[in-house]
Amino acid sequence: MPRPTVALRDATTPLTPIEAEAVLALARDAATADGSQPLSEQFRLSVRARDVDGVVHVLALSPDGALVGYAQCRTGDGPASAELVVAPSARREGVGTALLAALPDGMRLWSHATGSAASGASSFAAARGLVPVRSLHVMGRSLRSGPAWPSPSLDPRYAVRSFEPGRDEDAWLALNAAAFAHHPEQGSLRRADLEQRMAEPWWDPAGLILVVEADDPDVLAASHWTKVDPPGGEVGEVYVVAVSPDRQGQGLGRAVTVLGLDHLRGLGLDRVVLYVDEDNVAAVRTYATLGFEDLEVHRQFARPAADVAGAEPTDPTEPTDH
């Protein structure tokens, strides 16, 4: 196949609805072929939003105009973050290389591949001078068996309630921003991002558990946003656990995590999973003591700092794209 044509879309020239649906269909096809989602939730949401500031969409088109690959790059306070996917039928044809070349210098490329697909993604990255710079662990445990977790223990000055739409959005966003001030993705969540998630089929305000001041229940100390996607499924998720920095050291992270596990078990679910950065040693340790075990690892790749940014790969043999 001839090298694909690359087209860029951004806030000024957003994806059309037809293009957005084609991207999501491509991602579904790749997920079926590889056994893992090529695009993370935030990136899929940005495809549907189409006009998000700081987001660039890259479309790879075959000579007949068919979508054969897609990449997205997101800018924020830290290094630009990117993800890409190539149609299973168009791999080893230079599509991944064309997408990568269209991304800005200095970006960091995520791979969410698992199993044999992860090996292909690592080979693709290595052939283009990219090395692993970050690891995201997927951990899980049974909600019906395995080690028992303790009952939640909270100081009497705290109370527990559920998130109330129309009341708690701004307070929760402030808590989240403070708790994840140094997190390149979670810490940049905005009101529009929250509202987009609240419009998802899986949204359930009862699953966003708040630890508040007993004397002032509008003051948030910690939260545990749980998630069940798809709704009615058997797997829950520890979606976001946030503790106000000025409340650290009080055991709130562990307590609010346990409150969420109790909530998910009460729904009759079979299992629970979570995502945690390898560098967040305290969180990894907490989850391990609660019976979570590693299931898989997602990796982010970038050029070594000493490399010349934007150098073209010299290896003409292209491994499977992901």
Image: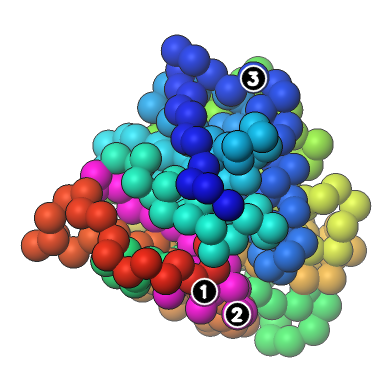
Question: Hey, which residue is sitting farthest left in the picture?
Answer: 306
- The answer to whether residue 152 is magenta is no
Q: In the displayed structure, does residue 153 sit left or right of residue 27?
A: left
Query: What is the CA distance from the residue labelled 2 to the residue labelled 1?
Result: 7 Å
Give residue 63's mark: none
The residue that mark 1 highlights is 120
Residues marked 2 and 3 touching at CB (< 8 Å): no
Give residue 16's mark: 3
Q: Residue at x 67, y 49 (%)?
A: 27
Q: Residue at x 60, y 37 (%)?
A: 63
Query: What is the CA distance from the residue labelled 3 to the residue labelled 1?
Result: 31 Å
Question: Hey, which residue is sitting farthest front in the picture?
Answer: 2
Q: Nearer the viewer, residue 316 or 80?
A: 316
Which is nearer the N-term, disc 3 or disc 1? 3
Give residue 116's mark: 2
Q: Residues within 10 Å of mark 1 (few under 14, many from 20)?
A: some
- Asked which quadrant contains residue 311, the reply is bottom left
Q: Which region of the structure is painted magenta?
A: 105-123
Residues marked 2 and 1 touching at CB (< 8 Å): yes
- Asked which quadrant contains residue 233, the reply is bottom right
The picture places residue 300, in percent across and down from the top left corner, at: 39, 62
Amino acid type, callout 1: Gly
Amino acid type, callout 2: Ser
SS assignment at label 1 = helix
Q: State whether residue 215 is above or below residue 53.
A: below
The picture places residue 216, in percent across and down from the top left corner, at: 52, 30
Q: Residues within 10 Å of mark 2 (few under 14, many from 20)?
A: few
**Visible in this render: residue 150?**
no
Q: Residue at x 35, y 42 (%)?
A: 103
